[in-house]
Amino acid sequence: MCGIVGIVGFSAVNQQIYDALTVLQHRGQDAAGIMTAHEGGLFLRKDNGLVRDVFEPHHMAGLEGNVGIGHVRYPTAGMDDSSEAQPFYVNSPYGIALGHNGNLINTDELTQELFDSDRRHLNTRSDSEVLLNVLAHELQRQSPAQVLSPAHIFEAVDGVYRRCRGAYSTVALICGHGVLGFRDPHGIRPMVLGSRETDQGTEYALASESAALDPLGF
């Protein structure tokens, strides 16, 4: 069991993601991570430990931007190692970061496919990195010379559904585009969508539990 959160707003989201992860701490106490996006740059802090220990003030100051995702980890797959703290990141296409709650049951098969057919190399034994690279490959197939549209993204997720078997909920940050959230086709792992109105417009958030969004007004 892990905890995930994603926020798209009009002001800095680093503290809001931190607060949401603190509420989700019971879902994973081994590692924590946050990635944000600002003006084409991506900013990441992750490590083993509790949320309060991983993020010190100077780390928080470096997490710039009004878009971001966060993760707290309980190691159900892979190893108990800081290299497997999430979010994971790949730079092609677009730059994609991903946080994942759940398990894939065909990880070995997908790992071989990614190496043999998709020409993608994995750095860990985590099924979350497998899921990220499958998503990245499916996005790459969606006319990369064109502007990435919602239709392209939804088609890529359909490709993930065709290939990835298991129970999972996922938040992904696609650089320059926003936050994507999806669950396995059977909706086994939980995820909730919240929104709130501001003077600048509607802000959105995703999380493993509504308890993480309620204190933030979503």
Image (spheres, rainbow, N blue to C red):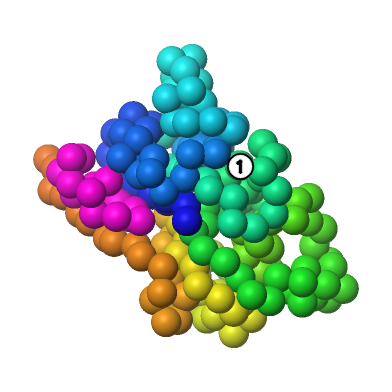
Residue 5 % position (x, y):
38, 49
Q: What range is drawn magenta here?
A: 201-218
Residue 121 counted in the magenta span:
no
Residue 48's place in the image compared with 167, above or below, is above
User: What SS does tag 1 mark?
Assistant: loop
Q: Left or right? Give the position of 87 relative to 127.
A: left
Q: Nearer the viewer, residue 53 or 36?
A: 53
Q: Nearer the viewer, residue 147 or 16?
A: 16
Q: Residue furthest top?
A: 58
Examine the rendering and report whether any part of residue 58 can be seen: yes
Q: Residue at x 29, y 61 (%)?
A: 192
Q: Quadrant of residue 19?
A: top left
Residue 164's place in the image compared with 47, above or below, is below
**Residue hosting label 1:** 85
Residue 178 % position (x, y):
43, 53
Residue 154's place in the image compared with 99, above or below, is below
Q: Residue at x 55, y 39 (%)?
A: 30
Q: Residue at x 61, y 42 (%)?
A: 85
Examine the rendering and report whether any part of residue 62 can be seen: no
- In the rendered structure, which amino acid carries the disc numbered 1? Ala
Residue 217 counted in the magenta span:
yes
Q: Nearer the viewer, residue 65 or 80?
A: 80
